[in-house]
Amino acid sequence: MSFTSLKLIEPVMKALADEGYTIPTPIQKQAIPYVLAGRDLQGCAQTGTGKTAAFAIPVIQLLHQQRKPKSGIKALVLTPTRELAIQIEESFSTYGKYTNIRHTIVYGGVSQLPQTRALRKGVDVLVATPGRLLDLIGQGFIRLNELEIFVLDEADRMLDMGFINDIRKVIRLLPPNRQTLFFSATMPGEIEKLAGVLLKDPVKVEVTPPTSTVDKIRQSIYHTTKADKPKMLLHLLREQKISTALVFTRTKHGADKVVKFLHRAEIKAAAIHGNKSQNARQNALNDFKTGRLKVLVATDIAARGIDIDELSHVFNYDLPNVPETYIHRIGRTGRAGLNGTAIAFCDVDERKELRDIEKLIMNKIPVVEKHPFPGNPVVIEKKAARPRHHRYRQHLN
Ligand code: AMP
């Protein structure tokens, strides 16, 4: 199935052709026709599935096709983090470049002046994080009374980050006659309840990242010690001539320590995490995308939603406590059909985490036994992990 059968307008088709997109992803295939038909949508999908385009494309098309003169904000996309907000706005620029849709973005942690200036010029689509949105509404810079489409992105993450009350406040300000698109990677009880309040007779769409993504990734594990992890990383970066690597640490402090170590070895690296200013995070991300930085060290929350094309290596410098996080992390590489490499370090205190991950993916991650930093020789379990459940496999099918 190609984009042609989705009945998209010429300006959108042209923009997609510029991007080299020919085939819609499963969520795009399932969601776009219903959104174009004006239906509410409950989408269970995470980053990497093409969900941004699944809502941005039809929103652009619906607004472009409106003949009536535009005045107020017609569509609002609410998303939890500044990084996600920036990426979503970029998507509206990309897919809407041959339309006259005006869009802008508001998020906290930076001066509001450029944002209020942009708002004054008139906006059709506003992408926002909750705190700054409410702030600017309070100051009278934003009114939502003409809103026609509301998109709530990453609802579960909003809940995790403590935004639920802010969301409730925003919801109270929305006109009741509107179309609502609701996206969440998971649907715990409280999120279902929120969806129930927000959506009218929604179409439900559920997708998970394709198996091929994970299958295409070359995974390996290096048993080492906590103290040797920095040297291990440096050794692999040099030995394997790695050009770009995203390195995940468990803590912000850990991320900073890795960056300091790499700097001492004259490797260009930067950290992104919650303690960094918005500008520092954005600069680091841009430098990484343009190749000025070789290594980006991130914590999970900061990295969520970060989308880097052609990322060759992901390091699990520390193993995550939640096994699903491992899949999210390694899914950053091997995108768009490219081969990726995921390398994990495991110290003696992380064996349980490793066992949990292997149970979840129902596979043993190959162990690289010959390397310079094995620490105390470890007893490597030879027996294959026996899957306790089939949750992951079911997700993939
Ligand atoms: P998302 O899940 O929205 O973060 O999108 C993941 C990545 O897939 C982004 O880099 C998009 O640019 C890319 N993408 C989205 N839709 C398509 C498509 N139909 N064909 C190829 N790439 C796509």
Image (cartoon, rainbow, N blue to C red):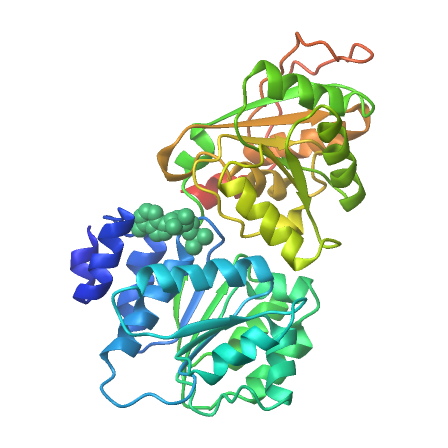
Q: Residue at x 22, y 86 (%)?
A: 67
> In which image quadrant can residue 397 be found?
top left
Q: Residue at x 61, y 74 (%)?
A: 130
Give the residue furthest to the top.
Answer: 370
Whether residue 53 can be seen here: yes
> In which image quadrant can residue 241 be found?
top right
Q: Residue at x 75, y 27 (%)?
A: 264
Q: Nearer the viewer, residue 259 or 204?
A: 259
User: Residue 338: x, y in percent?
Assistant: 39, 32
User: Residue 329: x, y in percent?
Assistant: 58, 40
User: Residue 94: x, y in percent?
Assistant: 34, 59
Q: Is residue 89 left or right of residue 139?
A: left
Whether residue 49 can be seen here: no
Q: Is residue 37 left or right of residue 121?
A: left
Q: Nearer the viewer, residue 60 or 165?
A: 60
Q: Residue at x 72, y 30 (%)?
A: 263
Q: Nearer the viewer, residue 386 or 30?
A: 30
Compared with 204, 265 (above or below) is above
User: Residue 200: x, y in percent?
Assistant: 42, 81
Compared with 181, 170 (above or below) is below
- The mark total stands at 0
Compared with 79, 363 (above or below) is above
